[in-house]
């Protein structure tokens, strides 16, 4: 049998005289070519199948991503037409055509080179450059791209957004998906002291215009897994990121849902400042009072969320919002907790007194001078009468004039370049202040009154100070018509208005002198030592009323 | 905001504060003269007895409220008295407050003109105060409650403090004789006249369903409120008589102001203390007027089954203003005061006890039926 078998096997050349070595080599080359062609045909068939499978872009999408790169390119180019800062980098990586799209100046190119281009194109040391990229996007994400942040996206709008936020968009031929490679890097302001809320003894870091930095500043203050950060997007065109920061097991039930509901109702194309969000969220857009607490300080936001409130951070603005907001919370400062309780209480009371002065001082001046000079000691009344005899205007016009000058001066100082602020202050404060008296336009007492009024409005939260500045005018009008009676009517009208204001279901003034919130009085007009304030403010309705660690005294 | 808690309810203590701050109002300044004229040296005693009498009426109101815990008088008075008489009681209640506002507003504007202005027309002053009161009465109960508390804790103590400055001119001898026998017959009329001082406690009938009960009993809390009111009125009367004597008080329209104007604090910045007192009296009067305006508006809202009380406030405002102008003369004001007093006394000492008796009688009838 073995012999028979051996006889059956013989040289190929004997059976087939044409099958020489060279001929076989030729045939093999043909076969290799055929295999290569079939692979190419297979790829094309794949693309055809993918394009057959491709559905039309949904209504809210600009286009649908195709698996054919050459089809995607004009679509993306059209979306970014006339956007010269959008860069397109074509390359062939691992046997496939690929495209990297990124925004010049907002993307870290070194990261892209290292995490994408070197990996896909193959560095000098990499041998398997001809290996084809796996079609499965998940294996691409798992095995190849080394970027820490990578997202696979199927929607065209998502891919465009990814580019606009500073990430790089990777599109590979044969894959009808885009990959967002985290490589944001843009110019931003460093963490500096809060411009409008400087403190003497507290922390000196303030928010900047970058949302991620601001979130970090809050995260650094509490290593708490219950601290949740929910990021939403606002603005039809700007797609500004907004972060809701809260403590999951403290936030008042229903508050977060209500904030989200109101945010969903916001319909605007662009969000430039946090005030826009505030105006959409507030129940009373016509009030001068800030119904959401505005702060530049991460410690204020952190303290607020641990009271059961919600912080709202808006990208591109350093002003965070806190909901709900009360008059009391706005009047408090971080410095109150850095000082001894007695001192802090004294300063707080002083701040409330300053608030009163900043609204009513000019009105009281008009009332006393014009209607009730008898309330002054005789010598002072005579002295004021003498001073006023030199000025041609009635008290009301005199005050109005000075008020206008003061407001213009304050506005000018804010918008003056910092290098000439000192010069402007000297000109405004000394020169105008002195000459206005010497020219007989105003009297020295009124200059003192207006200066005190101006200073007092700076002793509190800037937004609240602005509200008080707005209220001066109606009080001046009332006092010029009805004297002190008018001032008191004005004060009552302000009180009614403040008591009627609500911020996310909480009274704007409610905690103040509300007998049912007696516990909260410990940290309201005055501040008792921390050991007496074991509970969170009852007013904000936090889920856990007692501060952790204080339960056992 | 359904998931966030309602802020329109109040505690028993808050009800007591609201009652006290509503009752302590205009009469501190404009009511003393009439009361001392009536009671002479025994006015102090009549105020104490008056306080007890009206607290007794309040206890009856609490009893009535407990029988109908979730209802105001608008819903249970027709049940008790029948449709016709029940409606009369409701209108009586509303009218009582509306007339009081008109008389108080007139009295207050006269006092303000007297002490603060000489040339400003009183109508302008009344209009100003009424406008603020209307603005306040247009708000919901939660807002009103916060305002009442704020005024009670801020304006009322300052007012009381200023009032106590009069003690510098206090002469205890002026109070003597302490218990003159000749004035004893005047005790009852003065007690009844004293209703003017305590008027406003009737709001309890309406506010009872808005109150949630806590550890302190409602009777005790309101007892505290009446104690507070009695002390305040007593202090005013004692100071007025101690500074001016009984004759002085009866011959002065605004004795407290006159007593205050005689005070001088040498070495201080303060002069014309009566002006300060008037300024801090305005919020004390304001909170009374605002509640007095809000209550009838709410009553009519419920009566006519409206969902909003604001149209009624806006309807009442011009009526009150014109009624105030009609009462401008002292005689008209005096007559209106008398009418209001009798209406109030009739309601407090007639309608309330009778309603309770009616209720007890009906309950007894029900029990008999059950047996």
Image (spheres, coloured by chain):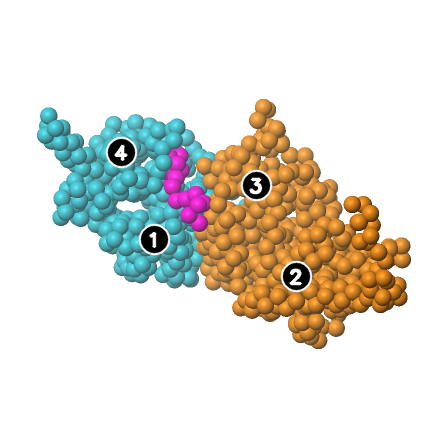
Which color has been applied to chain A in this rendered view?
orange
Are discs 1 and 3 both within one chain?
A: no
Q: Residue at x 19, y 34 (%)?
A: B356
- Secondary element at image label 2: loop
Q: Is residue B186 left or right of residue A282?
A: left
Which residue carries the number 1 mark?
Answer: B105
Which quadrant: the C terminus of chain A? top right
Chain identifier of the residue bearing label 4 in the image: B
Eyeballing the image, is B58 above or below A246? above
Residue A339, percent from left and from top: 69, 37
Q: Is residue A486 left or right of residue B53?
A: right
Which residue carries the number 2 mark?
Answer: A177
Spatial separation of the CA atoms under disc 1 and disc 2: 77 Å
Q: Confirm whether residue B265 shows in the render.
A: no
Spatial separation of the CA atoms under disc 1 and disc 3: 53 Å
Which color has been applied to chain B in this rendered view?
cyan
Residue A356, percent from left and from top: 56, 50
Residue B271, percent from left and from top: 53, 47
Q: Earlier in the sequence, mark 2 or mark 3?
A: 2
Which residue carries the number 3 mark?
Answer: A248
Q: Earlier in the sequence, mark 4 or mark 1?
A: 4
Q: Front-most of A20 and A239? A: A20
**Which mark's residue is nearer the viewer, 2 or 4?**
2
Spatial separation of the CA atoms under disc 2 and disc 4: 71 Å
- Secondary element at image label 4: helix
Chain identifier of the residue bearing label 2 in the image: A
Q: Front-most of A141 and B300? A: A141
Q: Residue at x 53, y 47 (%)?
A: A256
């Amino acid at each position: 049998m073995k012999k028979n078998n051996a006889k059956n096997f013989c040289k190929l050349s004997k059976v087939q005289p044409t099958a020489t070595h060279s001929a076989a080599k030729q045939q093999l080359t043909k076969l290799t070519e055929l295999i290569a062609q079939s692979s190419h045909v297979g790829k094309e068939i794949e693309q055809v199948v993918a394009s057959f499978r491709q559905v039309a872009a949904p209504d809210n999408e600009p286009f649908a991503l195709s698996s054919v790169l050459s089809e995607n390119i004009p679509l993306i180019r059209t979306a970014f037409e006339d956007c010269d800062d959008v860069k397109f980098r074509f390359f062939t990586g691992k046997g496939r055509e690929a495209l990297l799209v990124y925004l010049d100046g907002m993307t870290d190119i070194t990261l892209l080179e290292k995490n994408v281009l070197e990996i896909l194109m193959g560095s000098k040391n990499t041998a398997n450059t001809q290996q084809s990229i796996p079609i499965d996007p998940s294996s691409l994400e798992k095995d190849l791209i080394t970027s820490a942040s990578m997202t696979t996206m199927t929607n065209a709008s998502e891919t465009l957004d990814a580019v606009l936020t500073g990430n790089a968009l990777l599109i590979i031929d044969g894959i009808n998906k885009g990959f967002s490679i985290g490589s944001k890097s843009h110019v931003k302001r460093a963490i500096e002291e809060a411009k409008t809320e400087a403190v003497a003894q507290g922390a000196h870091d303030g928010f900047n215009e970058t949302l991620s930095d601001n979130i970090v500043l809050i995260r650094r203050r509490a290593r708490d897994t219950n601290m949740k950060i929910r990021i939403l997007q606002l603005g039809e065109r700007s797609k500004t990121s907004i972060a809701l920061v809260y403590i999951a097991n403290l936030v008042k039930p229903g508050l977060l849902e209500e904030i989200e509901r109101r945010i969903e109702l916001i319909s605007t194309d662009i969000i430039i400042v946090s005030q826009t969000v505030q105006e959409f969220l507030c129940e009373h857009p016509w009030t001068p009072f800030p119904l959401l607490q505005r702060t530049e300080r991460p410690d204020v936001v952190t303290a607020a969320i641990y009271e059961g409130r919600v912080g709202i951070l808006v990208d591109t603005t350093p002003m965070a919002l806190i909901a709900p907001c009360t008059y009391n919370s706005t009047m408090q400062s971080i410095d109150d907790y850095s000082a001894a309780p007695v001192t802090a209480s004294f300063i707080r009371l002083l701040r409330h007194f300053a608030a009163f002065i900043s609204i009513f001082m000019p009105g009281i001046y008009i009332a006393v001078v014009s209607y009730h000079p008898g309330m002054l000691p005789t010598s002072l009344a005579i002295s004021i009468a003498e001073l006023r005899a030199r000025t041609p205007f009635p008290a009301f016009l005199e005050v109005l004039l000075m008020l206008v000058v003061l407001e213009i001066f304050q506005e000018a100082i804010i918008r003056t370049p910092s290098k000439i602020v000192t010069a402007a202050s000297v000109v405004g404060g000394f020169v105008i202040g002195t000459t206005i008296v010497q020219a007989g336009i105003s009297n020295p007492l009124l200059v003192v009154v207006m200066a005190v009024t101006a200073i007092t409005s700076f002793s509190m939260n800037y937004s609240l100070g602005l509200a008080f500045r707005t209220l001066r005018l109606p009080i001046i009008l009332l006092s010029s018509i009805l004297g002190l009676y008018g001032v008191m009517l004005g004060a009552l009208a302000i009180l009614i208005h403040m008591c009627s204001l609500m911020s996310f279901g909480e009274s704007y003034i409610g905690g103040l002198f509300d007998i049912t919130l007696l516990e909260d009085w410990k940290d309201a007009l005055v501040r008792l030592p921390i050991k007496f304030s074991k509970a969170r403010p009852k007013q904000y309705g936090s889920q856990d009323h007692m501060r952790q660690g204080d339960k056992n005294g | 905001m359904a998931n966030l808690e309602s802020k329109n309810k109040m505690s028993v203590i808050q009800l007591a504060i609201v009652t006290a701050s509503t009752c302590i109002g205009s009469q501190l300044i404009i009511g003393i003269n009439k009361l001392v004229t009536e009671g002479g040296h025994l006015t102090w005693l009549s105020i104490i007895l008056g306080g007890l009498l009206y607290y007794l009426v309040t206890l009856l109101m609490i009893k009535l409220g407990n029988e109908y815990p979730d209802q105001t008088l608008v819903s249970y008075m027709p049940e008790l008295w029948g449709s016709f008489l029940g409606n009369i009681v409701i209108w009586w209640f509303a009218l009582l407050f509306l007339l009081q506002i008109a008389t108080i507003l007139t009295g207050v504007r006269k006092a303000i003109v007297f002490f603060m202005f000489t040339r400003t027309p009183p109508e302008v002053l009344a209009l100003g105060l009424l406008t603020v009161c209307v603005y306040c009465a247009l708000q919901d109960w939660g807002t009103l409650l916060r305002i009442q508390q704020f005024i009670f804790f801020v304006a009322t103590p300052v007012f009381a403090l200023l009032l106590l400055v009069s003690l510098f001119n206090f002469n205890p001898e002026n109070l003597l004789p302490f218990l003159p026998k000749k004035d004893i017959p005047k005790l009852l009329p003065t007690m009844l006249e004293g209703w003017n001082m305590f008027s406003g406690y009737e709001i309890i009938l309406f506010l009872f369903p808005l109150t949630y009960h806590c550890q302190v009993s409602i009777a005790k809390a309101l007892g505290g409120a009446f104690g507070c009111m009695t002390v305040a009125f007593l202090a005013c009367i004692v100071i007025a008589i101690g500074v001016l004597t009984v004759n002085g008080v009866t011959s002065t329209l605004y004795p407290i102001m006159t007593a205050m104007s005689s005070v001088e604090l040498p070495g201080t910045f303060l002069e014309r203390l009566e002006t300060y007192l008037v300024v801090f009296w305005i919020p004390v009067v304001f909170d009374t007027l605002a509640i007095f305006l809000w209550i009838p508006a709410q009553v009519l809202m419920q009566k006519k089954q409206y969902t909003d009380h604001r149209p009624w406030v806006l309807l009442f405002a011009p009526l009150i203003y014109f009624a105030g102008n009609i009462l401008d003369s002292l005689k008209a004001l005096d007559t209106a005061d008398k009418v209001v007093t009798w209406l109030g006394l009739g309601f407090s000492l007639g309608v309330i006890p009778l309603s309770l008796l009616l209720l007890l009688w009906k309950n007894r009838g029900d029990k008999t039926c059950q047996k």
